[in-house]
Amino acid sequence: MLKLPPVVLRLLPILASLFLLHLCACSPEPTADPIDEFALYETAGYREGGAPPQPLEETGTEETELEETGAAETGAAETGAAETGAEETGAEETGAEETGEEPTADLKNNASIVDNNLPLSLLCNALTPVNIVVRNTGTTTWTKADGYKLGTVDDEDPLYPSGTRVWLSEEAEVPPNAEWTFEFDLQAPAQSGVFFSDWRMVLEGEEWFGEIASRDIAVDCPQGGDPAPTEYPANDENEVFASAVKIKQEHPEFFDIEDLDNFTKRSLAYEMMTLVINDLRSKGVNASRCVANPGLPESDPFLWCSDALVVGSPGFGTTIDIYYSWSYPGDPQTSVTEEGGQTGVVTSDLIPLP
């Protein structure tokens, strides 16, 4: 019988364990946890012959986790990009809301209403001076020659029987950003009610443009009806004739104007009528100015009658020509041209009645 050395006998248990380990590695049973070969070698007491085997690396699992992590990071990046895009889109949308619609080019014709003194109420038959201040917000200059006017909207106004337009003066030029004051008179009707007055700039024959000045104006008639028109008293007729003669005698310069231009003639006629009317008012005659060309500014001498005045109570005055002509030397007269049709206008340069 073969007799083995003692050393070999001591190694037999170890060799048997390695043989069994080899068999397990070839056909391993499925287990929940991986085999730790390093622990087995430690258990067998292996200490010689170099470094022990290293633990198995779970490469597939780590790669999967890495892929999942990368996907998560990629998704996060995409999400961040989407959020950034959303923020940028939001900023663009906000800008559009703040800006509103794109600004249009400046309009050739445009206007804004700066101020007006359209009244809230009037008495029946009252003639009231008013003004509307308009700013040129377009890009062209307004002139009378070019056809720029203030007009009654829809070409009618119940309180402006004199016409439908208020003109610029002959010399007026209203450039962009400048203002112009239109001065004219509103005439209340003879019946009570609420009447709508509205005004807007117009380029005659082309277009209406700009803002509208408007107001509901209440017209009130006294109880008991309107007073009856008063006849032109004979005594007033005598006083008017006397004042007309007096002014012609004392101021011949007003009657020697043939060679002057029309604007200068009209300006002198305004001064002449001021003297005549104030002379009448100093004697207690209720005299005032009459309007010749409605719609012109009060400062324009062409607005006023140059050879006539109004005598009588407000709303029922009588218009009287006191000279045959203002353009040439005229003789005094007292010709009634309209009775009960004008109220007369008391301007600031007329003296109060005694």
Image (cartoon, rainbow, N blue to C red):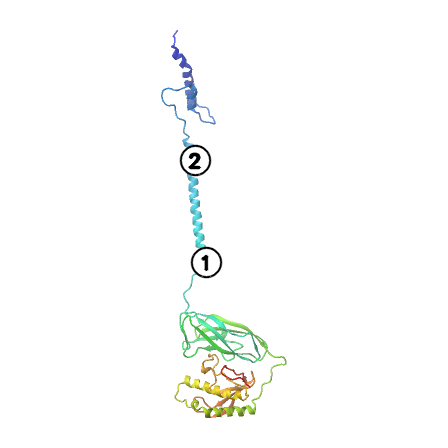
Badge 2 amino acid: Glu
Image coordinates of residue 94 in percent, x first then y, are 45, 55
Q: Kindly identify the residue that appears in the image at 43 percent across and 18 percent down.
A: 17
Image label count: 2
Image position of 283 with respect to 168: above or below: below
Badge nearest the viewer, 2 or 1: 1
Quadrant for the C terminus, please.
Answer: bottom right
Badge 1 amino acid: Glu
- The circle drawn on residue 175 is none
Q: Check disc 1 and report the residue beneath it.
A: 98
| Residue found farthest to the top | 1
| Residue found farthest to the front | 354
Find the distance from the CA under tag 2 to the CA under tag 1: 48 Å
Image coordinates of residue 126 in percent, x first then y, are 55, 80
Disc 2 packing (10 Å; few <14; some 14–19; many ≥20):
few
Image coordinates of residue 173 in percent, x first then y, are 40, 75
Image coordinates of residue 68 in percent, x first then y, are 43, 37
Residue 70 relative to residue 283: left or right: left
- The circle drawn on residue 65 is 2
Q: Kindly identify the residue that appears in the image at 41 percent across and 34 percent down.
A: 63
Disc 1 packing (10 Å; few <14; some 14–19; many ≥20):
few
Quadrant for the N terminus, please.
Answer: top left
Instruction: Name the N-terminal-most of marks 2 and 1.
Output: 2
- Label 1 sits on a secondary structure element that is helix
Q: Closest to the observer: 123 or 274?
A: 274
Image position of 57 with respect to 256: above or below: above
| Residue found farthest to the right | 224
Q: Are marks 2 and 1 in contact (CB under 8 Å)?
A: no
- Label 2 sits on a secondary structure element that is helix
